Image: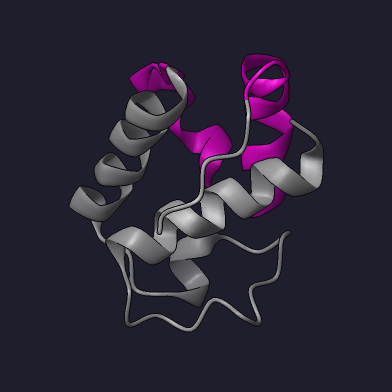
Amino acid sequence: MTRDEIIAAVRDIIHTIAPDEDLSNLNSQERLRDQIELDSMDFLDIVMELRKRYGVHVPEEDYKELSTLDGCADYLAPHMADKELKLSV
């Protein structure tokens, strides 16, 4: 997956978990929790969805790496390089 596809995958997962949030103006360098309403359970749901869709296990000590879209792309790139983008229907 490319960097843009990883960001699209994360945005799609966020949309699945928080469908009422407007994701159109997300700043990729700003903390997600500062831009949209995500609580701890929502964040865990994102991590679990990454595992379910892509088989990517994110250890708890690495959760901080997923605080921004850029951070997600940087952290997930080596784990998702050989994966195909799966968007929700």
Q: Position of residue 51 (x, y in %)?
A: 37, 24
Q: Main secondary structure of the magenta part?
A: helix
Q: Position of residue 11 (x, y in %)?
A: 54, 58
Q: Position of residue 67 (x, y in %)?
A: 53, 48
Q: Which residue is drawn at 70% across and 38% down?
A: 73
Please check the rendered image and state whether residue 88 is part of the magenta-colored stretch, yes or no. Answer: no
Judge from the rendering whether residue 10 lies leftward or rightward of residue 59; answer left or right.
right
Q: Is residue 25 above or below residue 51?
A: below
| Quadrant assignment for the C terminus | bottom left
Give the image quarter of residue 74. Answer: top right
Q: Which residue is drawn at 29% across and 32% down?
A: 48
53 and 50: which is toward the camera: 53
Outermost residue, front side: 89
Give the image quarter of residue 3. Answer: top right
Outermost residue, left side: 41
Q: Is residue 48 above or below residue 61?
A: below
- Count numbered badges in the picture: 0
Judge from the rendering whether residue 83 lies leftward or rightward of residue 49; answer left or right.
right
Which colour scheme appears in the figure? Answer: one colour
Q: Where is residue 57 in the image (x, y as percent from the top left)?
A: 41, 16
Q: Residue at x 72, y 45 (%)?
A: 5
Query: For the magenta stretch, what is the residue range?
Result: 56-83
| Quadrant assignment for the N terminus | top right
Judge from the rendering whether residue 41 lies leftward or rightward of residue 31; answer left or right.
left
Q: Residue at x 26, y 44 (%)?
A: 45
23 and 54: which is toward the camera: 54
Q: In this view, does 55 lie above or below 67?
A: above
